[in-house]
Image: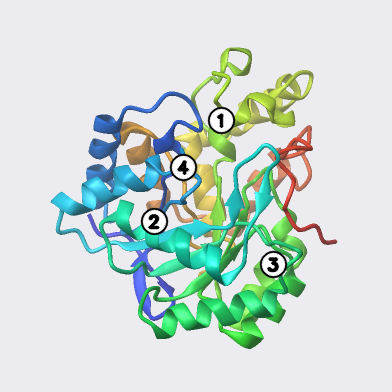
Amino acid sequence: MTLPQRRIGTRSVGAIGFGAMSLAGAFGAADDNVSMETLQAAVDAGIDFWDTANIYGMGRSETVVGRFLKQSNADIFLATKVGIIPGPPRRFGNSEDYIRSELEMSLTRLNRDRVELYYIHRRDPQTPVVEVAETMGKLIDEGLIGGWGLSEVAPFTIRQAHAVTPLTAVQNEYSLWSRQPELGVVRTCAQLGITFVPFSPVGRGALSDVDLDPPNFADSDFRKANPRFTEPNWSANMAQIRAFRTLAAARGVPTSALALAWVLAQGDHLIPIPGTRTAKHLSDLVTAASIDLSPADIADIDAVLPAGWAYGDRYSPTQVFGVESYS
């Protein structure tokens, strides 16, 4: 399958990427063999921009991706991340020594000698971002990474970092229920020629046709303590989501595909990275690339899910630690 193409760095990739966090069990139990089938389905669908991180399952996601790449000749634009040091207490590392040592381990798990994109997963306020940019510039010059990015940062950090070593991408949460990037990140990336990579573009599985059961999420599920998935917020959110499902059904498309199509419509410099554990859900998501939303369609969606509609914060106090705030 051929997806519409969008630019990231100097390369064109499919307009829809793949987020591999779920392969490590962050949203329910994962089966590595099923994950391999899902990655093959991504290749077959033309999804050639994949995103993982050293912290996902403490290397499990990278290991699964690396296992797949070792037996495949797929040409994948691969991104991974560094910067979160697991706790307790949770900490962040942005020093050159830490970044280099973690990159070496990531490359080993990924069966690669370089990655196309390397993100700072969270900013360490103790390390000036200009120093981080200089470190990433060295890694680019050495051929260990093709480009670099930042995650969950504010516009002012993007501008400071980009002035030292130009950024390839910025990755923040963005979807119909997480709209903060509209306060400056989406625009800043467009102005500077940086690809904006929305993660969780279908609301961590909420904006879909699947009836989630938050009280019975596994303790390891990231959403278990997330305010939007706890009561009374979850019931209030589901009332809104059901109305959105009705809108998707009227168009004859999966709800997740309509949610993803809305993200794609927010700018040609956006490449969302939805994640899933199964090939079936992946096929629903790919449908988004063929949905052409008119201004009237956007207005209909906005009438059902206007900015700020979601009940509850997108992170719990523990989860939000390290995310840059801005207004």
Is the residue 238 above or below the residue 298 in the image?
Answer: above
Is the residue 109 above or below the residue 227 in the image?
Answer: below
- Of callouts 4 and 3, which one flags the residue occurring earlier in the amino acid sequence? 4
Can see residue 285? yes
Q: In the image shown, does 252 or 193 lie closer to the viewer?
A: 193
Q: Indicate which disc residue 245 carries.
A: 1
Q: Separation of disc 2 and disc 4 at Cα?
A: 15 Å
Amino acid type at image mark 2: Ser
| Foreground tag (4 vs 3) | 4
Q: Separation of disc 2 and disc 3 at Cα?
A: 28 Å
Residue 267: horizontal and vertical position, in percent? Answer: 56, 67
What count of labels does the image hold? 4
Q: Separation of disc 4 and disc 1 at Cα?
A: 25 Å
Secondary element at image label 4 = helix
Residue 85: horizontal and vertical position, in percent? Answer: 60, 49
Say whether marks 2 and 1 touch (CB < 8 Å).
Answer: no
Looking at the rendering, which quadrant does residue 77 occupy?
Answer: bottom left
- Say left or right for 25 vs 11: right
Residue identified by numbered label 3: 185
Q: Indicate which disc residue 324 carries.
A: none
Is the residue 310 above or below the residue 218 in the image?
Answer: below
| Foreground tag (2 vs 3) | 2
Residue identified by numbered label 4: 21
Residue identified by numbered label 2: 106
Q: Quadrant of the N terminus?
A: bottom left
- Of callouts 3 and 1, which one flags the residue occurring earlier in the amino acid sequence? 3
- Of callouts 2 and 3, which one flags the residue occurring earlier in the amino acid sequence? 2
